[in-house]
Amino acid sequence: MNKVILIGRLTADPELRQTQSGIASCRFTVACDRRFADKNTGERQADFISCTAWRQTAEFVSRYFSKGKLICVEGSLRNNNYQDKNHPDVTHYTTDVQVDNVEFVGGKGESGGNGSGYSAPQNNFNNNYSAPPQQAAPQQPAAGNDSMSYGNLSDFEEILSDGDVPF
């Protein structure tokens, strides 16, 4: 299994580009702090990881994220290599994260998002569908709390399917 999850800060604004066929791609680098600080200096080191997103995810990243913002990236590792143009006998090797999903991290002021867990559309090409998790019903206020009135929740009907929702 090849699965990567990163949480870090963008080192620069994401670069949105289009292929000749009009497919959006976005390259960005995430700085991820290492778990432990250096014993001698007390400083934390970071790894700088190159990421590439495609299609709607690429557009989402370029629109809502900028340099210094926290981001959570989910994807897979890709190894690539290429020949140096100036030195044909030299081969360069790279490791990137092919991004499947991104999410905001932190509060509203921290990540530039609204902190509510919104995430980019996923590039799920395997057409797997799973029903969203069921949410717990709102709780009734405690007796004796007269500062706020919620009304009678029994007047409302629980909707079990969103099949008839117009949007």
Image (tube, rainbow, N blue to C red):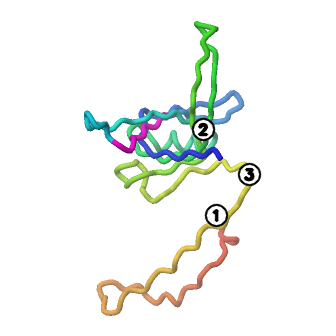
Residue 92 falls within the magenta-colored stretch: no
Q: Which mark is residue 126?
A: 3
Give the crowd class for mark 3: few <14, some 14-19, many >=20 residues within 10 Å: few
Left or right of 87, for residue 22? right
- Residue lying farthest bottom? 143
- Residue lying farthest right? 126
Q: Which mark is residue 167?
A: 1
Which amino acid lies under the numbered mark 2 shown in the image of this protein?
A: Leu
Identify the residue shown where x is 67% and y is 35%. 23
- Residue lying farthest left? 41
Q: Where is mark 2, residue-wise?
A: 77
Closer to the chain start, of discs 3 and 1, is 3
Closer to the chain start, of discs 2 and 3, is 2
Circle nearer the viewer, 3 or 1:
3
Give the crowd class for mark 2: few <14, some 14-19, many >=20 residues within 10 Å: some
Q: Which residues are magenta?
A: 28-36
Badge 1 element: loop
Q: Decide: is 165 above or below 138.
A: above
Question: Gap between marks 2 and 3, in whole Å?
Answer: 19 Å
Q: Position of residue 110 (x, y in %)?
A: 36, 49
Closer to the chain start, of discs 2 and 1, is 2
Question: Gap between marks 3 and 1, in whole Å?
Answer: 24 Å
Which amino acid lies under the numbered mark 3 shown in the image of this protein?
A: Asn
Identify the residue shown where x is 52% and y is 45%. 73
